[in-house]
Image: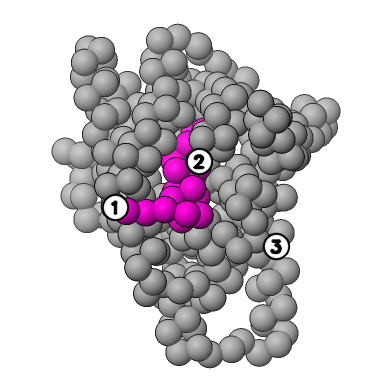
Amino acid sequence: MGDLFSILFDVLAPVFLVVAAGYVVGRRFDLDPRPTARIAYYVLVPAFVFEVLRASDLAGETVVRMLGVLVVTTVAVAGVAWLVGRGMGRTRSIIVAFVLVAVFGNVGNVGLAVTIFEFGEDAADLAGVAFLTVNVLAFLIAITAIRWGDEHPLRAFGAALATPAVLAVPPAILANATGSELPVFLDRMVGILAEGLIPIMLLTLGLQLAATTQLRLDADVVAATGLRLIAAPVIAAVAAALAGLDGDAAGVTIVMSAMPAAVFAGIVAIEHDLEPEMVTTAVLVSTLASVATLAVVLAVV
């Protein structure tokens, strides 16, 4: 019980208090979350990805296993979401909305902060690998599911490859492979931007939640939330055990898989007019419920 309270107050409380600060300020001053979201998306995220990947042991067996577990988990939870929607007799749009919520874990706003607080700064490279892997796969699966039958899947793949975070990968891998160093001024600039990612993303999440006005709590939201908070970490834990993944790598993988639904899911749903009220509500409900579910997951791992 002592460990559980320690997790709640020392690991989760700082994260959600920053989110709450963003929420309060957003409500008080009616702030638009899009400017900070775009700064994070186009500037801070690529800097963080570059900073993490250029220093990571990308060829290590542990990282390879971790990537495999994350891929299996994301694809599997998408499949489970599709089957749950079909089993509930839902329309195609609701089923695809289930998939959106299931695959878009909040590995950025909440995930990076929680994993680093729990496992230490040394786990930042593992968290960065998880962040990149989950987001690329989520965009690929989500856009493919939305456009399936209407547009060639390769276009969805191309759209995922064109995201700023992914574009930062090739130069980071090149720097990693060659061991090359950036000029001091560039190195410091990238470092400053990378360090700013977590607080900005947490505040942005609070602003985005404050801007959420249309909520629809029903069985679909409960099912989608369960897929994100329960099914995903269970699948990750089983996959990690089967892959022989252990230590911090297994912990980071499972914890990242236990994150609430990301606001990206709501953004995609709004952009494609795909059950936006249901998806937005699932993001909010899963974020609130994750205070309890993450505490349990962190206590177990």
Earlier-in-chain disc, 2 versus 1: 1
Counting other residues with Cα less than 10 Å from the Cα at mark 2, is it few (<14), some (14-19), or many (20 or more)? some
Q: Main secondary structure of the magenta part?
A: helix
Residue 150 in the image: state x and y as whole percent. Answer: 20, 39
Looking at the rendered structure, the kind of residue marked 3 is Glu
User: Could you say where residue 129 lies in the image, as x and y percent from the top left?
Assistant: 46, 60
Q: Which residue is drawn at 45% across and 89% down?
A: 178
Q: Can residue 171 be seen in this view?
A: no
Q: Mark 1: few, some, or many residues within 10 Å (few <14, many ≥20)?
A: some
Res 27 visible: yes
Front-most of residues 31 and 243: 243
User: What SS does tag 2 mark?
Assistant: loop
Vertically, is 212 above or below 168? above
- Looking at the figure, which quarter contains the N terminus? top right
Q: Give the range drawn in magenta.
A: 244-261
The amino acid at mark 1 is Ala
Task: Please tell me in which quadrant of the rendered image residue 289 appears.
Answer: top right
Q: Is residue 46 left or right of residue 257?
A: right
Residue drawn at the location 60% of the way across and 31% of the way down: 295
Disc 1 target residue: 243
